[in-house]
Every structure is written in structure tokens, then in C-alpha cells.
Image (spheres, grey):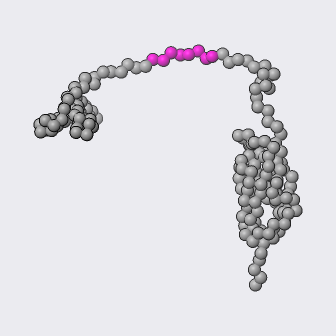
Amino acid sequence: MNLIRGIIITLSVFIAALSNAQNVYTWVDDDNIRHFSDEPISDDAQLNYRTEKIVIADAHVVATTPTFEALEPAEQPQLDNTMQDKYSPVLAPLTITIISPTNNENIHNSAGQITIQVELNRRLSAVEQLQLLLNEKPYSTPTNQTRWVLKNIDRGSHRFLIQSVVNGKVIASSSIVTVHLHRATVKQ
């Protein structure tokens, strides 16, 4: 019963809105600006402005349902092995070189900060990422950046290695670089 009442109320509101919104009034003011309204302007204003009444046609036009035709799939050209090799990108083997810091470098930094910069022989592909290893353990997550800033590293000797990984599989590695970090300490 509530469903029928809801449908009747909804239809009544919809029909009332359609019947009230059929006329549009327009006028141009002194500043040459066109105004639109669903109510006519007052008689005094009509003397000052050129007004028009626009009648909107019935909105009971029903749109037709679009129809679609099934398309046959286009034939894919068959590539022989020579064409596949010609058009598939061939990437040179990746080489990774740690350019900073150098091997056996002494770093004096009281904050324990070490900046590592690597050089690649080519750009990384979309699936390749670089993983920094500090003392044979992964440091942070793999990235496509070629620079790392390590902070608050303990004093002493540390070994760095950069690996290129694809889906967790190592495809290239740099040489191991050992650095010696010296941090100032406060004696008590």
C-alpha cells in the first residue's frame, strides 16, 4: 500500500513540475544583459525592457533505444619470428655502477648521513626497479630512483650493493662498495 502511495505522490509531483515549467520569459536590461525566468516580470518593468515569452514544446518525446550491430573481429596479421624480433624492443643488459661514494671512502658525518648515487647504462624499463642493500640486507623498498640518502647510519664500515629486480628476481648487480663512516661522539 505504501508503494502505491509513493508512486502516486511521485507522479503527481512530476506532472505538476511539467505543467509549471512550460513557459520561459526573457528580457534584456539596460546593460544589454539577457535574463531568463519562469515568471513574467512586473508591468512596470515591462515598460522599461523589451520582453518576450518563449513557449516550450511538450516534453513527452520518447527517445528511441539505440541499436548496435555486432562487429566481426578483424583479422590479426601473423608475424613470423623475424618480424617479431624486428618490432619487439631489445634492451641492452643493464649495468649498474655506484659513482658515489667510492670504494673504501672515509665519510665524516656527525648525523650519520650517507648519499649513494648510481649510474645506469640505460633507462630502466617499466618493470625494472633498483634495490639498495646495506650490509647484505635490503634497505627500504625497491625504487626507480638512482639516488638514496641514508640517515642515522651507525659509525663503522658498511657495504653497499645495488640490484636491479624484476618481480623479485635479480637481473643485474653493481660491485660492492665499502665505506667507513666516522661520527663525532660526546665523551662523558
Q: Position of residue 96 (x, y in %)?
A: 82, 48
Q: Is residue 70 magenta?
A: yes
| In this picture, residue 167 sits left or right of residue 38 | right
Q: Position of residue 35 (x, y in %)?
A: 25, 36
Quadrant of the rendered image containing residue 19: top left
Which residue is drawn at the image coordinates 73% and 61% (left, top)? 150
Evaluate whether residue 171 shows in this view. Answer: no
Evaluate whether residue 109 shows in this view. Answer: yes
Q: Main secondary structure of the magenta part?
A: loop
Quadrant of the rendered image containing residue 170: top right
Which portion, as a residue range, is magenta? 67-74
Q: How many labels were placed on the picture?
A: 0
| In this picture, residue 3 sits left or right of residue 68 | left
Residue 77 vertical position relative to residue 105 in the rendered view, above or below: above
Which residue is drawn at the image coordinates 79% and 69% (left, top)? 108
Which residue is drawn at the image coordinates 73% and 69% (left, top)? 111
Quadrant of the rendered image containing residue 147: bottom right
Which residue is drawn at the image coordinates 63% and 16% (left, top)? 74
- What is the quadrant of the C terminus in the image? bottom right
Q: Nearer the viewer, residue 104 or 71?
A: 104
Residue 71 vertical position relative to residue 41 in the rendered view, above or below: above
| In this picture, residue 105 sits left or right of residue 13 | right
Give the residue at the far left of this rendering: 43
Q: Is residue 105 magenta?
A: no
Q: Position of residue 183 (x, y in %)?
A: 78, 72
